[in-house]
Image: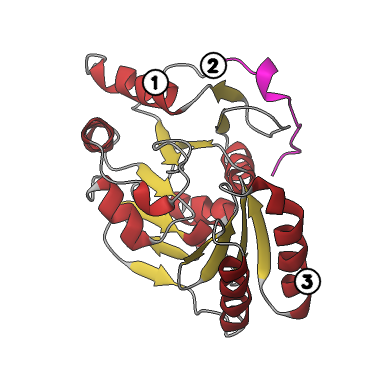
């Protein structure tokens, strides 16, 4: 993998139009295809989004994957199975285009993390616990003043267990050790129909930096959605509507 250079997102240009004949596209879900909301369960199917995804998957000959922190089941529900290839829980779950699923084994220490996070949420009802089977997340979007306390407790749990702390946008997540989003991209790129294509990864969160690095290392690039931090992405889109407009422009171009 080539060395990556961190850039400030506000200085990044918008991405070029998609070359559907040559690229493979990897998309995060929350913050990229769907807006970030206070409760993850409030995100559901969206007609425009899923119509775009279905058409895009066909135009890319199935070289399209969702790579998300959500579970496979959640992604399937939200996208109404518009995309066959999905990596869930940041890469710990993966479903190939042919439908084969590769699922990690949950770390037994997750029980302890779940118990601690639940206790915190009982003490501060604005905190939200999200259990994913292979990880557990504590969201503090509705209580930003709890940020430092939540992160400190999560760091202590990481140090005391075999779990891996993954900090995101107003969330601390403890996950089973294993594949990340970049490794998920690498696994897809080694399989049909992704082989030989140019990977493009579109993401918004810190966890997506692994995807940006993997795409760049395989001759592609990353696209950051939003701003506010340094990134390995090469291009930037402002928000979810800008992502959907960019994707829609690709599928409305005449097929050559």
Q: Is residue 146 left or right of residue 248?
A: right
Helix, strand or loop under label 1? helix
Q: Which residue is more in the foreground, 185 or 86?
A: 86
Q: Give the overall secondary structure of the magenta segment.
A: loop
Q: Residue 25's image quarter?
A: top left
Disc on the earlier residue, 1 or 3: 3
Q: Which numbered disc covers residue 246? A: 1
Distance, label 1 to label 3, CA atoms, is 41 Å
Picture residue at 39% right of the left edge, 38% below the top: 34
Of pointers 2 and 3, the one earlier in the residue sequence: 2
Up/down of 101 relative to 46, above or below: below
Where 210 falls versus 120 (above or below)? above
Magenta range is 1-14
Asked whether the residues under the numbered discs 1 and 3 touch, taking CB atoms below 8 Å apart as contact, a structural biologist would say: no
Taking the spot 23% from the left edge, 51% from the top edge, the residue there is 81
Give the percent coordinates (x, y) of residue 241: 40, 23
Whether residue 19 appears in this view of the structure is no
Q: Which residue is mark 2?
A: 14
Calculate the distance from the C-alpha at mark 2 to the C-alpha at mark 3.
40 Å
- The location of residue 143, given as percent across then percent down, is 62, 49
Compared with 36, 41 (above or below) is below
Left or right relative to 188: residue 147: right
Of marks 1 and 3, the one in the foreground = 3
Label 3: element kind: helix
Mark 1 and mark 2 in contact (Cβ < 8 Å)? yes
- Quarter of the image where the C terminus is located: top left
């Amino acid at each position: 993998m080539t060395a990556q250079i961190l850039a400030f997102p506000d200085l990044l240009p918008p991405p070029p139009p998609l070359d559907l004949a040559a690229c493979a596209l990897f998309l995060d879900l929350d913050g990229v295809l769907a807006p970030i909301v206070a409760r993850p369960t409030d995100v559901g199917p969206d007609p425009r989004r899923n119509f775009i995804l279905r058409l895009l998957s066909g135009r890319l000959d199935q070289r399209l994957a969702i790579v998300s922190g959500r579970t496979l089941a959640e992604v399937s529900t939200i996208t109404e199975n518009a995309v066959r290839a999905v990596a869930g829980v940041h890469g710990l779950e993966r479903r190939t285009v042919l439908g084969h699923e590769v699922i990690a084994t949950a770390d037994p220490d997750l029980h302890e993390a779940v118990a601690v996070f639940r206790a915190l949420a009982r003490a501060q009802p604005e905190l939200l616990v999200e259990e994913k089977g292979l990880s557990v997340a504590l969201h503090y979007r509705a209580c930003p003043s709890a940020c430092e306390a939540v992160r400190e407790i999560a760091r202590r749990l990481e140090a005391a267990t075999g779990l891996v702390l993954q900090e995101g946008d107003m969330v601390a997540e403890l996950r089973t050790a294993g594949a990340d989003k970049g490794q998920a991209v690498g696994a897809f790129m080694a399989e049909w129909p992704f082989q030989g294509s140019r990977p493009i990864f579109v993401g918004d969160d810190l966890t997506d930096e692994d995807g940006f690095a993997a795409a760049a290392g395989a001759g592609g690039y990353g696209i950051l959605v939003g701003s506010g931090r340094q990134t390995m992405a090469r291009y930037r889109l402002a928000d979810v509507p800008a992502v959907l407009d960019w994707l829609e422009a690709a599928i409305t171009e005449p097929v050559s």
